[in-house]
Image (cartoon, rainbow, N blue to C red):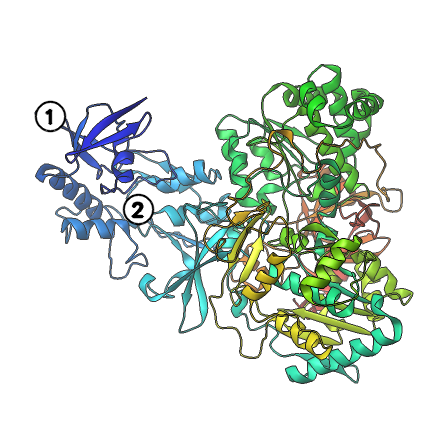
């Protein structure tokens, strides 16, 4: 329904459901508000948005909750309205301590701005109430309830926007206040410090504690950019003190995808690392066994000479290069082009190999494209969310907000994971599988779906190549058999199948719990098959959605930092493609031999197949499985070139170190998990002795007689884009604001929010690849009786170099803990906080235990964030047989309590251990 409303004498159309405030704002008519925020349901609490409604008989009503009605006549201001607004503002100012001079919020406070607009200098009445104590217990957020106006925005934001459900109102009337959980200090509450409450608080009641005293809003330069952490790609505003050359605060960019202003603790508060004194700031080369500072000229000349000598002696394929999912598209393209155009080998790869390699391979084989099919914001509109092998609240927090919102809107959420992760709190059904049994579980579900006639036969007929093959293959996995393998009760499996088969649009999300197995590609193919059987592809809020882990791991793949493809997945072994790139780059003799994958490059060091490794932004010695073996391999390299921003576990083995520019210091682009290309911007002046790595590659190439054509990040982008396919329409200019999602083949293409529209797959028809379940490579036995699975914690990222050099995150999570189920802990005589020795067949580490029911009996869990207790010392160097992605999620370990005497010796050792 539509109608016409008159506001301040203007006749304005509206649609059903619009409020008077909504119509006014849409037409540029200002009505002041305090409790209202675009992202929240209207609350009608503050009463400053009152408007006069009616002809002769008027009444004052809050415009934020007042539905527009046909023929309604509204006035937004008159003497009576102004008088009431002034009274409301005076009451708020009198009810609390609003000392604007000292308040951090000055210049951004909405109450201050309204008081100024209404000419309220000081409150008419001052209500004497005992002052509430300031809660400074949490590391990131300060709660000053003396300044609270009880508008309710923080409570609504916490419960409906980010759905963390920590803040609520307590007490009534004039005693009303906002509390954390059951009225405990914020530090003792379940608050995850995402800071959405700070962002939406209109006054100075909730403040970014770290930004206090660091500059008034008008003194700080604002720079929009993209988050440097997970693959969600949240859009940020950096607040920069230009005199100190430091970022002093971060806020989320409102109104733009993917995050609409929301952030997690890392994105909002993990911003100091670019200014850390621990940064690498000088090139180094190894002389007489010791790394020493040298000039850039000397470092580049040395590197050139050594590469030339070795490659001329042993051929180009002894050279290997790592790009990185943490550096920009431009730098990934630069190392890819250098490797192919200058060295003439395809031995280039990056860390997608250790995470989502199976997604790229499995989804490409099934659908023709190996990326997330749909968009992040669509998740909130899913009817059924099937989340498997994804610890979303910790690894992709902002995506988890959308999942929880979907639940609030009525979606059914099924979480399948060996570990009872936080997301289970919002799940309709939590399904605990045994580690490494996903194929059996998924096959069992498909069997049940076929058996009950819930398969989407029309979709199968019209949009897939070989439906009968999958139907037949799934007959081998009746629920009884599948249940026995995966450990899920038969009734639960039947219920999951029933929900998936009968309850509306299904959106599947997964991450590394699916891919990091010896059968990672099989797992991905099984998920793709399940979704094709259900037919929920090519539509809004559905699809198969691998959530990429690192800020630019999607981009690194798209840029061709892979051994088999140039940018946008153009095959290196296609002679036509090679000719195209020879012409585009002005070079001859591009190799058509598919290059080595990362683990193969490392393995080949031992037999002399790899002699040079050029490693950009990859802390290989901490990231690869079986760390001790990896380090032994790295030591055998003839030339190991490491480019990074911090010293780390890998740098001690380098022959050359090039310090890199850091996020915040360069211009460029990242591509997030939903295929959105967004700009990253320079906000800080880089250290004067740190150079961009594309410049280093250019200088090296010049010495080899090749002009890479790199003069700026924009020039690199243009070079890449000219010869790309799905990025051909994404110009530097077009992605400067909101970003664009590939496929975007032409400059006037709007980008693609969801792929395979109407079941038209990139490869034509969808292809089933039915798979048999097989056990993990190593299973617990008498010597090593427990499973170890690995993952990420909310507070840290990758190998901790960024988060451990940012204030507060280390305080929130200062050390690694191994999670042990109480049943196992009791058998071993271990309590939370005890020091334990954890050993696998590959090595041992010492750390403390956390006894928790998050994991099942017999299953333990930890991360690789901490160099001093790195889970990858234990993980197995076994691999997915298609993509060679390591099996990080399953290996066998034993845990022993360290007794007091051993502990005293250990305390000294721990102090001596260097932090990254
Ligand atoms: Fe950054 Fe990911 Fe957090 Fe967003 S969800 S703020 S991208 S770490």
Residue wearing tag 2: 148
Quadrant of the snapshot with the C terminus: bottom right
Q: Tag 1's secondary structure?
A: loop
Name which residue lies at 27% across and 49% down: 110
Ligand 1 within 8 Å of the CB at mark 2: no
Residue at 65 percent of width and 67 percent of height: 915
Task: Tell me what residue is drawn at x 74 percent, y 27 percent.
Answer: 488
Left or right? Give the position of 176 relative to 858.
left
Q: Mark 1 points at which residue?
A: 55
Q: Is 910 positioned to the left or the right of 190 in the image?
A: right
- N-terminal-most mark, 2 or 1: 1
Label disc, if present, on residue 251 of the rendered structure: none
For the question of whether residue 294 can be seen, the reply is: no
Residue 332 lies, in percent from the top left, at 65, 61
Packing grade of label 1 (10 A; few <14, some 14-19, many >=20) is: few
Q: Dot 2: few (<14), some (14–19), or many (≥20) neighbours within 10 Å? A: many
């Amino acid at each position: 329904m539509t109608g016409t409303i008159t506001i301040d004498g203007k006749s304005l159309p509206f649609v059903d459901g619009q409020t008077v405030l909504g119509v006014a704002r849409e037409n540029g008519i200002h009505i002041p508000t305090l409790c209202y925020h675009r992202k929240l349901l209207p609350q009608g609490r503050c009463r400053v948005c009152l408007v006069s409604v009616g002809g002769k008989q008027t009444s004052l009503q809050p415009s934020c909750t007042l539905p527009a009605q046909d023929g309604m006549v509204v006035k937004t201001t008159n003497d009576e309205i102004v008088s009431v607004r002034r009274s409301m503002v005076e009451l708020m100012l009198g009810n609390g301590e609003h000392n604007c001079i000292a308040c951090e919020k000055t210049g951004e406070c909405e109450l201050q701005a309204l008081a100024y607009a209404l000419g309220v200098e000081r409150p008419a009445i001052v209500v004497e109430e005992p002052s509430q104590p300031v809660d400074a217990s949490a590391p990131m957020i300060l709660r000053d309830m003396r300044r609270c106006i009880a508008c309710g925005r923080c409570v609504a934001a916490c419960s409906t926007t980010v759905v963390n459900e920590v803040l609520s109102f307590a007490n009534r009337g004039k005693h009303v206040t906002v509390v954390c959980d059951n009225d405990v200090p914020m530090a003792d509450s379940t608050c995850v410090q995402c800071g959405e409450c700070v962002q939406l608080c209109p006054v100075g009641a909730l403040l970014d504690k770290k930004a206090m005293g660091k500059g008034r809003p008008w003194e700080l330069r604002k720079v929009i950019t993209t988050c440097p952490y997970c693959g969600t790609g949240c859009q940020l505003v950096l607040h920069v003190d230009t005199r100190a050359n430091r970022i002093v605060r971060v806020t989320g960019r409102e109104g733009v995808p993917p995050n609409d202003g929301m952030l997690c603790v890392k994105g909002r508060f993990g911003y100091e690392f670019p200014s850390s004194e621990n940064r690498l700031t000088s090139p180094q080369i190894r002389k007489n066994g010791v790394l020493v500072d040298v000039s850039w000229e000397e470092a580049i000349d040395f590197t050139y000479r050594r590469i030339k000598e070795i490659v001329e002696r042993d051929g180009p394929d002894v050279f290997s290069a790592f790009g990185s999912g943490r550096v920009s598209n431009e730098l990934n393209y630069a190392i890819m082009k250098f490797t192919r155009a200058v060295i003439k080998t395809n031995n280039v790869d990056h860390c997608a190999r250790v995470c989502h390699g199976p997604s790229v391979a499995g989804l490409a084989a099934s659908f023709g494209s190996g990326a997330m099919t749909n968009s992040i914001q669509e998740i909130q509109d899913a009817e059924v969310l099937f989340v498997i092998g994804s610890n979303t609240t910790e690894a992709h927090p902002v995506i988890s907000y959308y999942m929880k919102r979907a639940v609030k809107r009525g979606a059914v959420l099924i979480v399948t994971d060996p570990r009872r992760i936080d997301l289970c709190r919002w799940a309709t059904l939590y399904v605990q599988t045994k580690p490494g049994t996903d194929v059996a579980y998924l096959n069992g579900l498909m069997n049940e779906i076929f058996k009950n006639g819930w398969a989407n036969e029309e979709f199968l007929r019209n949009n897939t190549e070989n439906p009968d093959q999958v139907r037949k293959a799934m007959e081998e996995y009746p629920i009884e058999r599948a249940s026995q393998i995966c450990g899920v009760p038969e009734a639960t499996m039947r219920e999951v199948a029933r929900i998936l088969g009968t309850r509306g649009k299904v959106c599947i999300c997964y991450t590394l719990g699916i891919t990091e197995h010896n059968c990672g590609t099989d797992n991905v193919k099984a998920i793709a098959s399940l979704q094709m059987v259900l037919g929920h592809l090519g539509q809004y809020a559905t699809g198969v959605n691998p959530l990429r882990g690192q800020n630019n791991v999607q981009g690194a793949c798209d840029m061709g930092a892979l051994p088999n493809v140039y940018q946008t997945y153009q095959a290196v072994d296609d002679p036509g493609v090679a000719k195209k790139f020879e012409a585009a780059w002005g070079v001859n003799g591009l190799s058509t031999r598919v290059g080595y994958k990362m683990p193969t490059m490392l393995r080949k060091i031992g037999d002399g197949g790899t002699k040079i490794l050029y490693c950009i932004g990859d802390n290989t010695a901490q990231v690869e499985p079986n760390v001790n073996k990896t380090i032994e391999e790295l030591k055998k390299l003839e030339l190991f070139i490491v480019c990074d921003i911090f010293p780390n576990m890998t740098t001690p083995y380098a022959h050359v170190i090039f310090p890199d520019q850091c996020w915040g210091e360069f211009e460029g682009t990242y591509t997030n998990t939903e295929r959105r290309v967004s700009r990253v911007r320079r906000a800080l002046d880089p250290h004067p002795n740190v150079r961009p790595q594309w410049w280093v590659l250019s200088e090296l190439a010049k010495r080899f007689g090749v002009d890479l054509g790199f003069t700026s990040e924009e020039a690199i982008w243009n070079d890449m884009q000219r010869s790309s396919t799905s990025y051909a329409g994404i110009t530097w200019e077009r992605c400067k604001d909101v970003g664009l999602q590939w496929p975007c083949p032409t400059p006037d293409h709007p980008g693609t929010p969801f792929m395979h529209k109407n079941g038209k797959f990139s490869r034509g028809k969808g292809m089933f690849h039915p798979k048999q379940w097989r056990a993990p490579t190593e299973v617990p036995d008498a010597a090593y009786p427990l499973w170890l699975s690995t993952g990420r914690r909310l507070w840290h990222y990758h190998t901790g170099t960024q988060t451990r050099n940012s204030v507060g995150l280390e305080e929130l999570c200062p050390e690694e803990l191994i999670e042990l189920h109480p049943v196992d802990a009791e058998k071993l005589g271990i309590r939370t906080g005890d020091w334990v020795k954890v050993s696998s067949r590959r090595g041992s580490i010492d750390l403390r235990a956390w006894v928790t029911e998050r994991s099942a009996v017999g299953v333990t869990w930890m991360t690789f964030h901490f160099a001093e207790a790195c889970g990858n010392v234990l993980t197995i160097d076994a691999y997915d047989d298609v993509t060679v992605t390591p099996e990080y999620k399953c290996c066998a370990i034993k845990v022993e309590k360290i007794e007091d005497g051993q502990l005293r010796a250990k305390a000294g050792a721990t102090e001596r251990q260097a932090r990254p």
